[in-house]
Image (cartoon, grey):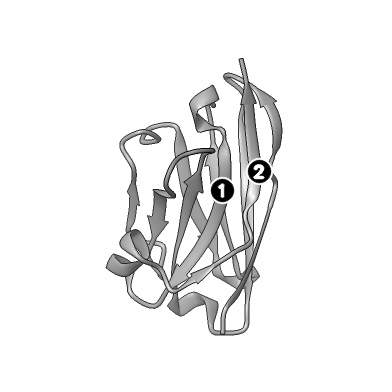
Amino acid sequence: QVQLVESGGGLVQAGASLTLSCAASGRTFSRYAMGWFRQAPGREREFVAAISWSGGSSYYADSVKGRFTIFRDNAKNTVYLQMNSLKPEDTAVYYCSADPQYTSAIRSPDYWGQGTQVTVSS
């Protein structure tokens, strides 16, 4: 019942910055916690970051803490992931997610986007 569409992925060099966007529709966006996950080839999907519906709380995986920032603009029904100091190990398909409960958004969100590829070269 919530549709999520990611954009902004691409091919960049190590150390570069990239910002992903996720546009939401179908339900009241401002009442959903939002998150980002990623999946690299041969690996399980892993949590990256999450933000509460108000934007007052956020949580990051240790691997991206200090480099990535999640933020949202509820007026635009959009959540963003700003990625700085990108490393080759950040290469993955990045998925936007949504869940009415903040804690569930971190572990097992209800809704997913289609994913956008981020490739970081050496």
Mark 1, Cα crowd under 10 Å, few <14 / some 14-19 / many 20+, is many
- Give the quarter of the image for residue 64: top left
Under circle 2, the secondary element is strand
Residue type (three-letter) at the residue carrying disc 2: Gln
Residue 57 rendering spot, x and y as whole percentages:
32, 59
Q: Residue at x 53, y 77 (%)?
A: 29
Contact, mark 2 vs mark 1 (Cβ under 8 Å): yes
Task: Residue 94: give its label.
Answer: 1
Q: Residue at x 70, y 46 (%)?
A: 8
Task: Residue 117: give its label.
Answer: 2
Residue 17 rendering spot, x and y as whole percentages:
61, 30
Count of number-bearing discs = 2
Along the line of sight, the residue nearer the viewer: 27 or 90:
90
User: Above or below — where is 45 with respect to 17?
Assistant: below
Along the line of sight, the residue nearer the viewer: 62 or 40:
40
Q: Is residue 85 visible?
A: no
Q: For the N terminus, which image quadrant? A: bottom right
Q: For the C terminus, which image quadrant? A: top right
Q: Is residue 83 visible?
A: yes
Taking the image as shown, residue 74 lies to the left or right of residue 56, namely right
User: Above or below — where is 23 with respect to 119?
Assistant: below
Task: Residue 56: give its label.
Answer: none
- Give the quarter of the image for residue 115: bottom right
Taking the image as shown, residue 119 lies to the left or right of residue 72, namely right
Residue type (three-letter) at the residue carrying disc 1: Tyr
Residue 7 rendering spot, x and y as whole percentages:
70, 53
Under circle 1, the secondary element is strand
Residue 54 rendering spot, x and y as whole percentages:
40, 69
* Labels 2 and 1: the sequence-earlier one: 1
